[in-house]
Image (cartoon, helix red, strand yellow):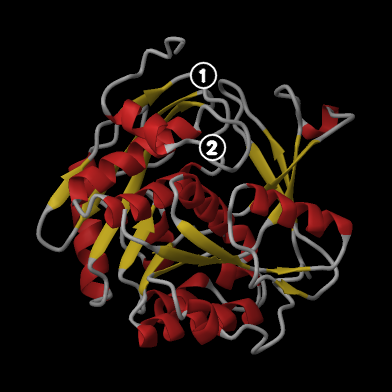
Amino acid sequence: MERNKVVTFGEIMVRLGAPDYLKLIQSNSLDVSYAGAEANVAVSLAHYGISTDYVTCLPDNPVAERCVMELRGHKVGVKHIVRSGKRMGILYLETGSNMRPSKVFYDREYSSIAMIENDSIDWHEVLKDANWFHWTGITPALSQNAADECLKAIKAANELGVTVSCDINYRGNLWNYGKTAAEVMPELVKGCDLILGNEEDCEKVFGIKPLNFDAENTNGNIKQESFLSVCKQMIEKFPRCKKMAVTLRGAINANHNTWSGILYDGNQLYQSSKYDITDIVDRVGGGDSFMGGLIFGLLHYKDNQKALDFATAASAYKHTLKGDFNWATIEDVEALMGGNVSGRVKR
């Protein structure tokens, strides 16, 4: 494998999850882990052997230090993490079952990264030996300062010839500092070479939607080709973009989803296999594991169909793992790509 380095930027939070399918209001204890879209991507890539640097802003306290130790344990580079501010954001999670959906509650106002100081990161220095930079729409939703820092990173990457990818990752509850996603995101997305969205992101941020699609009533059936028009419109709107990917989740219930993806390169539409995922362990982080798999696939295979197949299989595998991080190896994912879905014990 040729030497690649990927840099990601965003917020990592303390994840406090209610155990054993309990609702939060029932729980006398919470499972502690760490969660954040861009950190999730970095962890996935590190597990595939890609060199990574994760950039964020953390306070100087034991909880943040434990988080850094966790990242180091996954072989994620942490040397560019800025230490400032007073708190990490918190994500509270209750895992749904059957007709009861999973719920996420955020407590992340005034977190260290939301309060990041201007020019606290030298992006040309951070990106000087990288060939890929990844960010998501969560970061500019946190504050004006975080949005400004994200834009500086994208511009520096463009100047240095570094490939830039974005997961639109729209979170309506986060955009509360006086600007909307529709106002902020276009300036950032126009600097991207690869854009990822789910079945609703493009509609909610850019007003671009597929015809005759209702995300709340899929019954597990989503026609991949119906999203080709979304990809075409996004590439037309953002001419720098060379590839557009969409993850497609068909929700049957909280434990049973279908999962697939598409990739469009401006000429050809690539479609993945559809995975029927029953008995979901944890779906949070599924889109991030797709993004990590897609970046790896495009760098490693240099083949659009194989890259898409790897990304979809990696994210399907993630649904079997508790926590935000995808612990899958290349061998795990390639076995699933090859049709090994029996779950038979390996000895």
**Mark seen at residue 180:** none
Nearest the camera: 123 or 38?
123
Pointer 1 local density, CA inside 10 Å: few below 14, some 14–19, many at least 20: some
Dot 2: within a 10 Å radius of its alpha carbon, few (fewer than 14), some, or many (20 or more) residues?
some
Q: Quadrant of residue 144?
A: bottom right
Quadrant in which residue 139 is drawn? bottom right
Q: Amino acid at mark 2?
A: Trp
Secondary structure at badge 1 equals: loop
Relative to 233, does residue 75 appear above or below in the rendering?
A: above
Disc 2 versus disc 1: nearer the observer: 2
Counting from the top left corner in percent of width and height, residue 195 is at 34, 63
Q: Is residue 289 visible?
A: yes
Q: Residue furthest left?
A: 267
- Name the residue at 41% across, 30% down: 332
> What's the residue type where badge 1 is placed?
Asp
- Residue at which label 2 appears: 327
On the picture, is 174 further left or further right than 203?
A: right
- The relative height of residue 174 versus residue 123 in the rendered view (above or below) is above
**Of pointers 2 and 1, the one earlier in the residue sequence:** 1
| Residue 275 at x, y percent in the picture | 33, 27
Q: Which residue is mark 1?
A: 279
For the point 34% across and 27% down, the residue is 336
Residue 243, above or below 273: below
- Please name whichever residue, 134 or 97, is drawn nearer the observer in this view of the structure: 134
In this view, the residue in front, 248 or 273, is 273
